[in-house]
Image (spheres, rainbow, N blue to C red):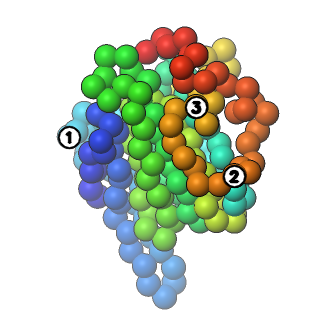
Amino acid sequence: MELIPTPLVGCYEVRPFFAQDERGTFVKTFHAERFSALGLPTEWREEYYSSSRKGVIRGMHFQTPPHDHEKLVYCMQGRVLDVVLDLRKASPTHGRHIAVELDAARGHGLMIPKGMAHGFLALTEDVLMAYKVTSVYAPENDAGIRWDSFGLHWGLDRPIVSARDRAHPAFADFDNPF
């Protein structure tokens, strides 16, 4: 397993052990000792997944303190454009974002630190995304940044976006607790 730093401080691309043969694939998505050696979380409080069809944008989501969390995401089926936006005011990469293609055929994922918003665009039909987080979901701390407000061109004119995600504040109007 490799953990490759991204241009956002503290955010890593996860390149897991990946094996494929005539039976299918086997992917190791997490290795406690490797994460621990880099000071990354090794204890997860919740794990969940979402399914999306092509053209869906989910995001940009996060939880605010004191229920903010680190998040490990990976694509179990299909391909996505996975996006992370740094909200941390003291970070040298504050306000910057990255967009990384995650593909189930490669097994790659992202390790996202506290204080970053996360979202993705489903590039294929029948996308399945998995998430591990270090805090329990707290509805009163559930928050987001509007998907089209921080300078990323998502590459499509008419995405499928939930009413909730359309209602998030723009990045410029966000009351930042980080």
N-terminal label among 2 and 3: 3
N-terminal label among 2 and 1: 1
Residue 149: numbered disc: 3
Residue occupying the point 41% across, 59% down? 108
Which residue in the protein does label 2 denote? 157
Q: Is residue 22 left or right of residue 143?
A: left
Residue 76: numbered disc: none
Q: Is residue 75 left or right of residue 40?
A: right
Neighbour class for label 3 at 10 Å: few (<14), some, many (≥20)?
some
Image coords of residue 161 (percent x, y): 73, 42
Q: Nearer the viewer, residue 82 or 27?
A: 82
> Can residue 43 be seen in the rendering of this structure?
no
Residue occupying the point 61% across, 61% down? 123
* Disc 2 to disc 3: CB gap under 8 Å: no
| Amino acid residing under circle 1 | Ala
Image coords of residue 114 (percent x, y): 42, 26
| Amino acid residing under circle 2 | Asp
Residue 37: numbered disc: 1
Residue occupying the point 25% across, 33% down? 39
Q: Secondary structure at mark 3?
A: loop
N-terminal label among 1 and 3: 1
Q: Nearer the viewer, residue 85 or 43?
A: 85
| Extreme residue toward the bottom, this view | 22
Nearer to us of marks 2 and 1 is: 2
Q: Quadrant of residue 124?
A: bottom right
Spatial separation of the CA atoms under disc 1 and disc 3: 36 Å
Spatial separation of the CA atoms under disc 2 and disc 1: 43 Å
> Can residue 101 be seen in the rendering of this structure?
yes
35 over 135 or under it: above or below: below
Residue occupying the point 29% across, 58% down? 1
